[in-house]
Image (cartoon, coloured by chain):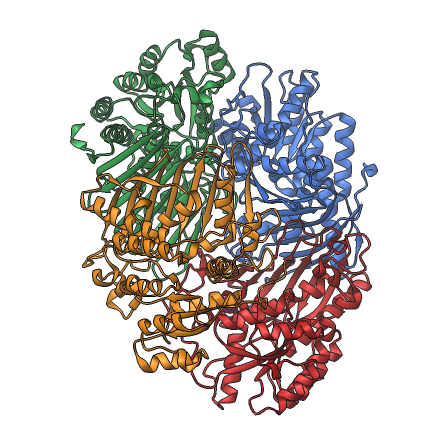
Chain colours: A orange, B green, C blue, D red
Amino acid sequence: MSENTQGTLSNRLTYGMVGGGIGSFIGPVHKAAIAIDNSADLVCGSFSRNKEKNQATGLDWQIESDRIYDDFEKMADAEAKRPDGIDFVVIVVPNNLHYKCSKVFLEKGINVVCDKPLAFTPEEGYDLMKLASEKGLEFMVTYTYTGYPMVNEAKRIIADGEIGDIRMVMAEYPQGWLADRAEDTDNKQAQWRVDPERAGLSCCVGDIGTHVENMVHYVTGLEIDRLSASLDTFVEGRKLDDNARINIEYKGGAKGIYWSSQIAISEENGLKFRIYGTNGALEWEQEKPNVLIYKRKDLPTQIYTRGNGYLSVNAQQLTRIPAGHPEGYFEAFGNLYKKYCRKLTAKKNNEALSENVTFTDVVDGTRGIKFVHDCVKSSNQDGAWVDGSFDYKKQ
Amino acid sequence: MSENTQGTLSNRLTYGMVGGGIGSFIGPVHKAAIAIDNSADLVCGSFSRNKEKNQATGLDWQIESDRIYDDFEKMADAEAKRPDGIDFVVIVVPNNLHYKCSKVFLEKGINVVCDKPLAFTPEEGYDLMKLASEKGLEFMVTYTYTGYPMVNEAKRIIADGEIGDIRMVMAEYPQGWLADRAEDTDNKQAQWRVDPERAGLSCCVGDIGTHVENMVHYVTGLEIDRLSASLDTFVEGRKLDDNARINIEYKGGAKGIYWSSQIAISEENGLKFRIYGTNGALEWEQEKPNVLIYKRKDLPTQIYTRGNGYLSVNAQQLTRIPAGHPEGYFEAFGNLYKKYCRKLTAKKNNEALSENVTFTDVVDGTRGIKFVHDCVKSSNQDGAWVDGSFDYKKQ
Amino acid sequence: MSENTQGTLSNRLTYGMVGGGIGSFIGPVHKAAIAIDNSADLVCGSFSRNKEKNQATGLDWQIESDRIYDDFEKMADAEAKRPDGIDFVVIVVPNNLHYKCSKVFLEKGINVVCDKPLAFTPEEGYDLMKLASEKGLEFMVTYTYTGYPMVNEAKRIIADGEIGDIRMVMAEYPQGWLADRAEDTDNKQAQWRVDPERAGLSCCVGDIGTHVENMVHYVTGLEIDRLSASLDTFVEGRKLDDNARINIEYKGGAKGIYWSSQIAISEENGLKFRIYGTNGALEWEQEKPNVLIYKRKDLPTQIYTRGNGYLSVNAQQLTRIPAGHPEGYFEAFGNLYKKYCRKLTAKKNNEALSENVTFTDVVDGTRGIKFVHDCVKSSNQDGAWVDGSFDYKKQ
Amino acid sequence: MSENTQGTLSNRLTYGMVGGGIGSFIGPVHKAAIAIDNSADLVCGSFSRNKEKNQATGLDWQIESDRIYDDFEKMADAEAKRPDGIDFVVIVVPNNLHYKCSKVFLEKGINVVCDKPLAFTPEEGYDLMKLASEKGLEFMVTYTYTGYPMVNEAKRIIADGEIGDIRMVMAEYPQGWLADRAEDTDNKQAQWRVDPERAGLSCCVGDIGTHVENMVHYVTGLEIDRLSASLDTFVEGRKLDDNARINIEYKGGAKGIYWSSQIAISEENGLKFRIYGTNGALEWEQEKPNVLIYKRKDLPTQIYTRGNGYLSVNAQQLTRIPAGHPEGYFEAFGNLYKKYCRKLTAKKNNEALSENVTFTDVVDGTRGIKFVHDCVKSSNQDGAWVDGSFDYKKQ
């Protein structure tokens, strides 16, 4: 059993939060995820535009009163000036404010963590990529599912060439919670997702299809060459898609099928990939995250499970408790911050990182937005093939 | 525990076989499948063009010498003339002879059972449909997987409207056995499948993609409206496809994705469907055939297993042994014959069948050929949508 | 894909059946199991004490009229005298006739296949052991579950020392079909099992606990040293046990727990073993018979599946169709006969068998009866440890 | 999706910790578990007997310097006197100090949370029971696995009588990490567990068998009447057991088998129960904690999964994130504190709790110690039945 070596004395990181006022869902999740590994301390915030709620949240979270800010512009400004200003900001505001808020903190020289989607247009994404690059800042976009240890083991296995050249990718993300008009109930999560004003061009692809795209890219490194997408709206009265069938061709010859759905009755959160190479195959499901299935040519299939000594060091570092003690969504989330904070600490201390610390960043966030736009474009042309490539130089 | 009531005395059915000589694979499988339920007796055959092998097979299977025929034309002729001639013929010759051989027996007024693919062109299929219809003969095409009891329970659940209107179908058939150049070894099964002369237009879609098409149609009754197919050849030097991505739109608004592959490393025989309706969903895998997963809206998922009293009479009749005693491929195959022979017996005795006896027939076989042709056509146009409808009137 | 090489011409085996008249359950199962591999031909029988039923069964199964016998004594006598007399007899009469009927055929020099339980007392078993040995006859007792290919692979892995010395065995056989008073319905299977006259000393241990004992012995070779058994009767009014908790200590230091139950609601036919050695562990379930789980020390668990090239030759010979095409109970049953007939053929031809052909025989059947008696003895003493050893010399 | 309503302003709870200094394993787990729901704030501690480590830990966790105590006696004394003294103390010291440390805090009137085992002898347990009762204090013993939502749903289903009267309990806890002499490596977790000085009378039963006992009692409410235990030591040189076979008879007629093992190669943390009643059965595995299998008489098995609306309010309150987003060990741990803190808050505010808030307490902890003693006693008498009842009045 490994011992927890978090919580060392020197140079603790601090952070602030924008959004996350009492009653919000995702703010406390970020806070809890950071707390699992004691990665950083929350010291300031602008938790709500509602003054009372803002104060109450700050008080409850034991924030000193002079670091509870009325708005995020003031917060960015003040924290940038303080000698003990925050190391990074966590942005958990509604999607339509992601771009604006991220930009404000980057401009003040503060590292940013922002939920996906990073922005609404690829151009906004390129803008943030450029800004972060110019300022030399670390910008994490929280594609939570990439934090699972076994996802990172899959990435390692593929990078080491163990399964050979990838031929076929089957990836999917079925959910069933929007199979009826949940938006007509008091379900706020449903309401904004089906609303073009707040969700942007797409509901299903934008909300979960983009996780499929990100996951496959994260694990395989494959770049899309072209794609053909058919976005469906099954529930009457909706303006956006609630199901999507996407045919993918990658640079280099691999092919793929992505399916995402919000009308797949009784499916919960079924993000899953199966990746077939010339020499082996990998299979992983978000709902059974502690397991990675490794299929080998002409040999018995192997079951890798979290926390074992036969896993790579990287996968072992992303876990806290012994094999057989399940870790889940919070712990995956915590791993994003574990990596991010390791990188920030190294930078702060002018130390080189001995290993490769990878997290989903502003480039991945921008790629994701372009993917959504490409899918919508193809679907609007009855599934015609469209260029799906993502050109880094635009940054 | 149910008792076996097969093997009643009166009016036993007899059959002959074309093909199936010693050393063949599928002939003995048919014979064993029929024997499980004692559905009919093998009494004649033309087992091989090789005279010695033909005789040896007949002798071994205790066929009377005057009913071991040199060729199937003679067999059809002689059996049609005998007062005790066979009730049906089982055709297990190479694919390129299916059409010709079936036609000969139909013309002589003998019921036919033929392996899939029924023929090489839709026109040949329509021809056989017409002939069988005119002669009033029963023509079964052995899509074996439709014989599983839980597949038939799924069909029943959908027909009864339990899962509501179907929205989305995810169906797949991954295999891995052609991930390398198996055709360069002494693997005859591989050799003919990758050979356009013997396999026809398609390897992967023709061999297994067509099972996906058939299974979905059998279970749901859905008719394809249009489809977009991308056929891939991953293994170098092959002339035919070894992987296929197919996007489906059905008449009535349902959508689907079909994936079939022969290069999916380590996959064995992974035929699987997931069917999502407005009120529930069904999931079934050929490799776990005794289980049907029934997902219900807002309720716990239910696991149906073969042999239980809560299943419909139809599903119960297609099983022989108590729940928990696994039945497999042979028994599914046996069920095809169980149904087919029940129908023949009823006809022979001029009895009405009290229940609906459904098996995959010459119409399904023809639909299957058209599906393969449609997929190849679409793929040749870079995945353009093509008309995928199947017009019964053509018969 | 392997080709079926059954059905060669020379020296076909023939067999007769005692019991199995129209309406019986297990007779047709034996016949179908033999037919799957075309292992032998049914040529005579005494199918029922009821003359009409006897004749009808014989006629239906195309038995020549002079080989349909009124009783098994006459059958044994007549077949022993015929130059073309049967190679073996299949005994599927009620349990209380197993001993008597087996003895008659052995005495006439005819090889015997008999369902379990072989007899009612260990002494009867020792008697049959002695007789078969003296006559040099092959006597198979059909512990069907030992016919599964993956069970035989487990046996091979252990025999090869791969998992090291066995320490702990967890084996169980839960069923739920007797959780209520099924014997009060028209369920004949329930009626005889709970009746001391027809079932003997025990219901649960005798019917299924004995399969646990046999399976563990077959796979591991372990001999019981002593045991402590607690037999429970949960359903009111029953005279025999419907649940059993058994604590086992083997010769050599290994330990085990056996649980069998007929009141485990909703369990179907859950025979399962987990065997833990010093270097690995094996896990197998009868309801998922095509899979063997192989757990290795400090390494990922491996999943072995039927029909693959990485399995031993023995396991490959016990299968007919490619990996991924499920085989089940009938095919396991067929494997018993495949082995048995291979041995008979070798003996008949005075050929040495190149490999070790193992099937459960009269010794295993006798060991099973002693096990049941030992369990009842211990339970009658409130679970006191009793000598559980089985002494071959007694034969 | 539910919203997180933790973090309300008024009356936050505070706690202190004894043990948990930098480098320790379980201290940070408690702290992270509490942080997930923001249930209470750590404000003081005596983290290590090592002064430097104690200070460093306190500093790192931002404890005010006057509340970092040299030893727990001083801490109990000081905190009891402070007007803003802690609401409860978390005791994570080595097992041999549990009793002593708990007693000190109880005597000062401070609520206690202590890891299991609560103490080394039943008498010590009775002593703490009495003290807590006299002082009116809440004493939680952290049997973590009872915190899983689906365990609590199982408890609810049984309490509501849905599965009828319980007949048979199969419960087990296999692990494989002590299959070799891990104690000869630098594995501290192994070292103390196999050491009678530090582990007490038993290794396997004391460490994990006791979780089996507690889990079954928690879920079913069954009280043991008598038990027969066989404790095994498979690894040479060990003084304590590393495997245990336990036969249980409960008051009221139910029976059970418990198996715990530390030598079950490759098993990770396999706590599992199967509970069979007269009308249904429940099955749950710690390694798949989000799933509860509900088997019903004559009906399809149902799969309950965490986070769904069809679960009871209680199970829903013990989860944070939507169905399909896995929660694991940390979240189960968090639930213990969620319940404990809800009870403390209610008491503090003199409010009645609207629902029944149940957590494993000093009574459960004492029952657990008695169970270990009973098992050792039986095993020392070669598995003789011993009285396994637990008499509350002794408190």
Instruction: Out of D336 and A56, give the one closest to the viewer.
Output: A56
Q: Say above or below: C57 vs B43.
A: below
Q: Say above or below: C19 vs D195.
A: above
Quadrant location, the C terminus of chain D: bottom right
Estimate the x, y position of residue A380 in percent, counting from the top left. Answer: 18, 46
Estimate the x, y position of residue B88 in percent, counting from the top left. Answer: 35, 23
Left or right of A59? Residue D79 is right
State whether residue C204 appears in this view. yes
Instruction: Out of C18 and B275, give the one closest to the viewer.
Output: B275
State whether residue B1 appears in this view. no
Estimate the x, y position of residue D112 in percent, counting from the top left. Answer: 62, 81
Instruction: Out of B30 and A329, give the one closest to the viewer.
Output: A329
Estimate the x, y position of residue D204 in percent, counting from the top left. Answer: 71, 61
Furthest residue in direction right, as rendered: C393
- The quadrant holding residue A22 is bottom left
- The quadrant holding residue D7 is bottom left
Furthest residue in direction left, as rendered: B393
Q: Residue at x 41, y 50 (%)?
A: B293
Left or right of B78? Residue D189 is right
Q: Say above or below: A321 vs D152.
A: above
Q: Residue at x 57, y 57 (%)?
A: C263
Q: How many marks?
A: 0
Q: Residue at x 44, y 8 (%)?
A: B50
- The quadrant holding residue A87 is bottom left
Q: Say above or below: D284 vs D264.
A: below
Quadrant location, the N terminus of chain D: bottom left
Instruction: Out of A68 and B24, give the one closest to the viewer.
Output: A68
Left or right of D222? Residue B279 is left
